[in-house]
Every structure is written in C-alpha cells, then in structure tokens.
Image (spheres, rainbow, N blue to C red):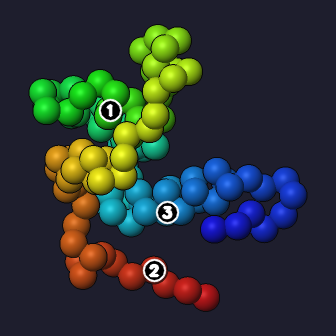
Amino acid sequence: MIATNESQSFGDKIYYNWAKALVRQLNGNPRELCFHSFRHYVIAHLKELPEVSDKQRRDLVGHIGGDVHDEQYDVATSMTVMRGVVAKLPRLFRAPGAMKTCRTG
C-alpha cells in the first residue's frame, strides 16, 4: 500500500481498507465499530489470558512500556511469539468463501 499523493498518509490507506472490511464483514457495520473498538476488544480479551504477558499485549497493540526502563532498554517481542499471541484471539469474521462480493462500476 502506497499513498497516492503527498497529502495522503500510509495510515489513510490502512484506514480505507479497514473501514471497507468492517462494512463487508459486519453486514454494513450497524454498531459503527472502528479500529479503536477492535483494539479495545483485543486488549480486554488478552488481559483475561494469564499466559499472555503485559509486554506481549502492549507490543501487539503498539503501546509503550510500563516504565522508562521498558521504553528505553527493552526489545520487541519476536514475531514467533506474537504469532502465538494472535492465535489466541477468537475468530470473529466469516470465512472468506462466505463473504459477499462487491459490485464494481
């Protein structure tokens, strides 16, 4: 994903695709959920799992460390470990074959 002009950010492209996916997966998104809603859900769910550390949870959602030592001297959780953390999240979306296709034109 590349921004198409100087006034558009990478985040704009991510948001556009995210918003489109929410509408498709949540039948029009009648509850008006947003990325913040998803992030809140992930944090709340992972807090219930004792095998997921605070650091792993913070690294996954992009929060800074618990103190200055964490922020300055810690290293990011490995992708192998993060993959295991993500696998602990429940699957909420329909299977890809069940998705409605968008009309074009």
Whether the residues at callouts 1 and 2 have beta carbons within 8 Å, the answer is: no
- Disc 3 designates what residue? 20
Q: Mark 3 or mark 2, which is nearer the start of the sequence?
A: 3
Picture residue at 33% right of the left edge, 78% below the top: 100
Picture residue at 27% right of the left edge, 76% below the top: 96
- Disc 2 designates what residue? 102
Tell me where residue 66 appears, x and y as whole percent: 42, 15
Q: Amino acid at mark 3?
A: Lys
- As drawn, is 102 to the left or to the right of 7? left
Residue that lies at the very extreme toward the front in this rendered image: 73
In which quadrant of the rendered view does residue 55 lie? top left
Q: Which one is closest to the eye, mark 1 or mark 2? A: 1
Picture residue at 46% right of the left edge, 27% below the top: 74
Residue that lies at the very extreme toward the bottom in this rendered image: 105
Where disc 3 sits, the SS reads: helix
Quadrant location of the N terminus in the rendered image: bottom right
Q: Amino acid at mark 2?
A: Cys
Q: Is residue 86 visible?
A: no
- Disc 1 designates what residue? 57
**In terms of depth relative to the viewer, which is nearer, 68 or 96?**
68
- As drawn, is 72 to the left or to the right of 85? right
Where disc 2 sits, the SS reads: loop
